[in-house]
Image (cartoon, rainbow, N blue to C red):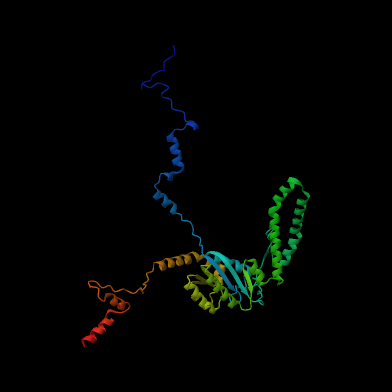
Amino acid sequence: MPAMPVVCGGGRSEHSRRRPSTSPMFRSPSLFRRSVLAAAPGLLAPPFFRSLSTAAAPAARKPTTAVAVLWDLAASRPPTTLPLYDAAVRLHLAATSYGHLRLSAAFVHPSHRLPPLAAPAATTHLCRVCGRRFRARDALLRHFDTIHVREHAKRLARIDSSRGGRRVRLAAALALKISKYEKAARELTEGADAAAGVATPAGELGRAGVRVALTRTPAASLLERAQQVLDEGSVGCLMLVSGKDELASMLRVARERGVRSVVVGGESGLARWADVGFSWAEVIAGKARTAAPSVSGKWRDRDVLKRLEWRYEEEDDEEEVVFEDSDGDGVEELARKAKGKPWWKLDSDGEDSSNGA
């Protein structure tokens, strides 16, 4: 006869006191609900509070205005302590802080030459491969030819002598060193050309992504190109790098058409006619780029206020005179005569006065 289960004092059997198994495949719904809420506590929050939590960290708004940069190199030159290529790059950085760069053009006189760079007193030349510094450029070139050129030749020889998978693995392992050497050699070559006087304004600006137009009248060419840009209506911000006061009339036209204007080279009076002006020192130091968010915010606020501004528009429609409570005799003729005339200058009044006399 099978043994009966032992009943304890509470009236429960031994089998009923056992807890159910909590295997991963058979979890209770309550345990699953607690794990989900622990992983994503925002699911139970109302939509209003969820919107507040997402709005606590707003994303930075990127300007979408198209920007055109027009540069008169003869009227606004960067400092001689900075190469022309670096000046153009920093000018583009300042322009892109106001929107995406759509056009960048420079107008250069054919006889324009780059001024010699004013080198500081304590100049050190850095080797881009190993990081060693040299006081003389000749010492840097001698060090580069003696050590790094030979190392590069040995790397290429190792890759050429390898075959199959070993060649692929070796080329991948040495790719970083090879690219570093090629970049350093390119910088040394360009520096040698600039030191020898080979560099030209067109070449330096072309390397920075600026379209160069050689003309004997840079100011007139810039004015013509700016007028063409305004007529096309393809940009919302015009950046002029010039110091000619003759461009003030064009800036007034740009303001009338709703195009923002930025002037670089504000040592002249041209910056007074623009929305904002910066000097070359502020562009190089990055102040023009830092001030872009606040300036763009002011422009947006001004546009909103302009749209909300109330304007009185006088209606030119002629009011028609309607005669009521009449028997219809002569009404149409009086209405035809009354159009466009005050009520005290009707022809009928003159006729009545003459008959009465």
| Residue 334 rendering spot, x and y as whole percentages | 28, 77
Where 101 falls versus 346 (above or below)?
above
Q: For the view shown, which residue lies furthest in the left direction?
A: 356
- Given residues 87 and 330, the one toward you in this image is 330
Residue at figure coordinates x 45%, y 36% from the top left? 32
Where 57 falls versus 29 (above or below)?
below
Q: For the view shown, which residue lies furthest in the front direction?
A: 329
- Given residues 121 and 99, the one toward you in this image is 99
Q: For the view shown, which residue lies furthest in the bottom direction?
A: 357
- The C terminus lies in quadrant: bottom left
Q: Is residue 251 visible?
A: yes
| Residue 231 rendering spot, x and y as whole percentages | 53, 72
| Residue 29 rendering spot, x and y as whole percentages | 43, 34
| Residue 151 rendering spot, x and y as whole percentages | 75, 56
- The N terminus lies in quadrant: top left
Residue at figure coordinates x 43%, y 54% from the top left? 55
Q: Is residue 136 visible?
A: no
Total numbered circles: 0
Where 157 falls versus 23 (above or below)?
below
Where 152 falls versus 209 (above or below)?
above
In the displayed structure, does residue 281 sit left or right of residue 194? left
- Given residues 169 and 287, the one toward you in this image is 169
